[in-house]
Image (tube, helix red, strand yellow):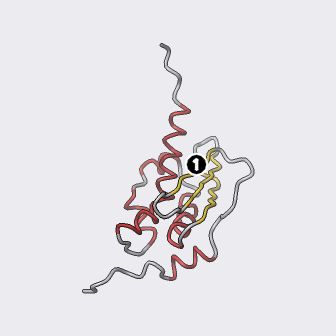
């Protein structure tokens, strides 16, 4: 058994960091959200174009930070295109970590999960906007 964690800078992570999938901005996103990790300064914004059947047509990200946080955002955007918002609501932190294909220390998990946190907060906000206002 290995006495160290996998190298977090493996080819999968570095490929997405050096040649990110859909880094940039959508012209007219349906929804977007940004967040940052105040400890290390990583920042991620995710923008989604969602059709009238609640399917993600396009997902883009922008940000700055370490290779893991930026590669994770790229990997997330690539993996969620074509999925429904309902599928994304069921998407869990462990699913995100599995997409990265490397084991991360606890501190590096914060980097790897930043885009996941952005996505989940965006979905929550979208759900809140769609709820009918209660009469009171």
Q: Is residue 79 above or below residue 54?
A: below
Q: Residue at x 55, y 39 (%)?
A: 126
Q: Residue at x 46, y 65 (%)?
A: 111
Q: Depth check: 93 or 79 in front?
A: 93
Badge 1 marks a residue whose secondary structure is strand
| Apparent side of residue 27 relative to residue 52 in the rendered image (left or right) | right
| Apparent side of residue 70 relative to residue 117 in the rendered image (left or right) | right
Q: Residue furthest left?
A: 1
Task: Give the quadrant of residue 4.
Answer: bottom left
- For disc 1, the marked residue is 33
Q: Is residue 130 above or below residue 91?
A: above
Task: Give the quadrant of residue 109.
Answer: bottom left
Q: Depth check: 118 or 78 in front?
A: 118
Q: Depth check: 119 or 64 in front?
A: 64
Crowd rating for badge 1 (residues with CA inside 10 Å; few <14, some 14–19, many 20+) = some
Position in image of residue 44 (x %, y %): 57, 58
Q: Residue furthest front?
A: 39
Position in image of residue 53 (x %, y %): 60, 42
Q: Residue at x 53, y 24 (%)?
A: 132
Position in image of residue 80 (x %, y %): 54, 58
């Amino acid at each position: 058994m290995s006495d160290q964690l996998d190298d977090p800078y493996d080819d999968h992570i570095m490929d997405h960091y050096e040649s990110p999938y859909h880094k940039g901005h959508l012209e007219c996103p349906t929804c977007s959200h940004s967040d940052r990790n105040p400890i290390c300064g990583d920042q991620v914004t995710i923008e989604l174009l969602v059709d009238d059947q609640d399917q993600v047509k396009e997902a883009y990200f922008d940000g700055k930070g370490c290779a893991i946080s930026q590669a994770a955002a790229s990997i997330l955007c690539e993996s969620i295109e074509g999925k429904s918002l309902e599928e994304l609501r069921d998407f869990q932190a462990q699913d995100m970590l599995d997409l990265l294909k490397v084991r991360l220390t606890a501190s590096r998990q914060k980097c790897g999960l930043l885009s996941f946190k952005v996505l989940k907060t965006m979905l929550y906000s979208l759900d809140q906007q769609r709820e009918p206002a209660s009469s009171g």
